[in-house]
Amino acid sequence: MRYVVISDIHGNFPALQMVLMDAQPFDAILCLGDVVGYGPNPNECVERLQDFPFTCIVGNHDWGAIGRADLLIFNNDARQALYWTQQELSLENRNFLSDLPATVEMDTFMLAHGSPREPIWEYLVDARSARDNFTMFDFHVALVGHTHLPLALEWAEGPQQARILLPDWGTPLSLDGRRLILNPGSVGQPRDGDPRASYAILDTEHMTWEFRRVPYAVEITQERMRARGLPSRLIDRLQMGR
């Protein structure tokens, strides 16, 4: 199977559309949560996922949008965007988000928005937290999102036990015989200094993972956000990828 792996779309429909075009051909979508929040097109993003075979898990902003997370947990900009998203979501799409699981296991793959240990909230960005997750669970490969940073974390026997692997763009990473935590980065709000939409291709026949980037019309998303009165900081950061 050839999967397009996406996370943190955050209501950014132009970015999602470009990723789905760039990733062709693929057999199915694996979505690692936060379909909504921040961005101006939550309904369109939820509905577009369902045009393909997909597996999707829930993220913290999805929870915020359906009232399962206290919005006081979020910073002021995120909270304002979630108040707006709550009013914007159709009942059908609220129900879709409500039905999403926190984790999914597929053969030797585990899907979680944050981490296997804390599926909704934990940020996996360092070797220590990765080591804790590797030792607590027996997954072969965990696919996570939440940080908006494309990243690979690998288990390695030895004093460090876990190490960080930075993306090698366009070069497939072999998964055979390795334990890994893989993050495709963010489709709709990258935070690694590159404003292009970030995603990955998972090929389970050849057991490879490939980090990918694709540009999209950032200004269209920004214009839609302004028209909806969303916070200016969220609008500006799209252009910087921060």
Image (spheres, grey):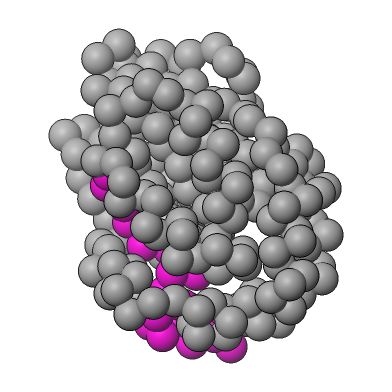
Q: Which residue is drawn at 25% across and 62% down?
A: 101
**Looking at the rendering, which quadrant does residue 91 occupy?**
bottom left
Residue placed most toward the observer, 104 or 41: 41
Image quarter (top left, top right, bottom left or bottom right) of the N terminus = top left
Residue 99 drawn at (x, y percent): 24, 69
Q: Is residue 137 visible?
A: no
**Residue 178 in the image: above or below residue 188:** above
Q: Is 204 a magenta residue?
A: no
Give the residue displayed 30% in from the left and 11% down from the top: 206
Task: Please tell me which residue lies in front, 214 or 79.
Answer: 214
Q: Residue furthest left?
A: 107
Q: Which of 62 and 41 is in front in this view?
A: 41
- Where residue 159 appears, as percent x and y from the top left, is 51, 30
Is residue 9 shown left or right of residue 33?
right
Q: Give the range drawn in magenta.
A: 54-72
Q: On the rendered structure, is 93 left or right of 34?
A: left
> Is 94 located above or below residue 195 in the figure?
below
Please say whether residue 96 is visible from this viewpoint. Answer: yes
Which residue is located at x 52 percent, y 27 percent?
22
Q: Where is residue 9 in the image (x, y as percent from the top left)?
A: 53, 53
Report how many numbered discs are placed on residues in the image. 0
At 82% from the left and 48% from the top, the residue drawn is: 240
Q: In the image shown, does 162 or 150 lie closer to the viewer?
A: 150
